[in-house]
Amino acid sequence: MFFIDTSRNNKPVYNAIVNQSLDNYLVNDLRLPGHGLILYINNPSVIIGVNQNAYAEVNFPYLKKNKIQLVRRTSGGGAVYHDYGNFIFENIVIGDDEHFGDYAYFAKPIIDALHDMGATGVEMRGRNDIVVDGKKFSGMTMFKVGDSYAAGGTLMFDLDMETASKVLTPEQDKLESKGVKSVNKRITNIKPYLDEPFKSMSANDFKVELLKRIYHVDKLSDIETYTLNDKDWDIIYSRLEDKYDTDAWNYGKNPGFTNYVSKHFDIGTVAFNFSLKDNKISDVKIYGDFITGGDISLIEKALVGAEFDKDNLVKALSSVDLAANLGKIEPETLADLLLSKK
């Protein structure tokens, strides 16, 4: 595994919109053969999953007042708050999809490094969370293009919890499914669990120590490294103008359909925003923090025109490969969710 240095002119890049576009460039364009790793820090920002409804996840008045960026990533998963006390790590794997979907495989180097730094209670929990003492400090996600993919997540070192709790508005159903009443009670920073001198370090100093342990080296110069060059940055910034730095991508359209239903399942939260005409679905948009390598628009297209009753909704949903395009969930379960608006 080599390291991909995402600094520019020897200076770290903190712009969250820029950083969140890097994985797409690395997987689709640069395509360095093998297994690379990036590790960076964002300025204060809310990062939402590719399939999430920003208007249901974010406290917009607070976001605007505090000049916090809103950024949509190219992979699934839920909404998270980032600041200078938080790290983002991503494994960029080109030409080998053997470990796609195996979160534990990509979490292990992080977990082993944190164990070595004194946080011996760190472990995987659920499908894609890393926890300590039962509290989450890292959530992971993936996206795939052919036989290549990006797999990574956050690592909360010294995140501002108060700001995170005010700017994020997770749906109550999701919290209740996890047996908690607020976002604050289920997350933590890893910093208090570390030994000295690590718990007294700045985020940037901790980043250096973390990388040294992930790569088992005494100094960063011993790590095989590819540094993004001017040509790389020119392409990255051109993509920002076309897509990733646009309101259409980051905010998305709030369709304002008549009905909104949402429920948390084992695959994640699934929500339907839809309208009815003559007791048929006339418009529908699927949202959620589920992680899929498929195409949810196929499910939306199958539902448009379906009679709004259990049998016809199940028939429409059964015409699509739900496992491939959403997750392991039964058509009857989704039909019941749609009908729960009554």
Image (tube, rainbow, N blue to C red):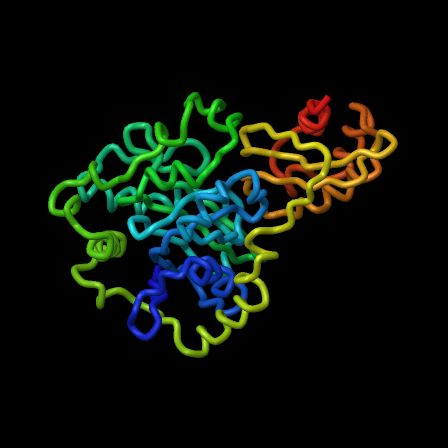
In this view, 206 is above or below 190: below
Residue 308 is drawn in which quadrant? Answer: top right
Q: Looking at the image, which residue is at 68% across and 29% down?
A: 334
Left or right: 265 in relation to 319: left
Q: Is residue 326 left or right of residue 187?
A: right
Q: Which residue lies most toward the right here?
A: 278
Towards the viewer: 24 or 51: 51
Quadrant of the frame with the C terminus: top right
**Picture coordinates of residue 331, whole percent (x, y):** 71, 29
User: What residue appears at the point 56 percent right and 61 percent down from the top-left corner?
Assistant: 246
Q: Residue furthest left?
A: 196
* Residue 173 appears in the figure: yes
| Position in image of residue 18 (x %, y %) | 45, 63
Quarter of image, res 328:
top right
Indicate whether 285 appears above or below 42.
Answer: above
Where residue 332 sits: x, y (%)? 71, 25
Residue 93 in view, yes or no: no
Residue at (49% x, 69% y) in the render? 236
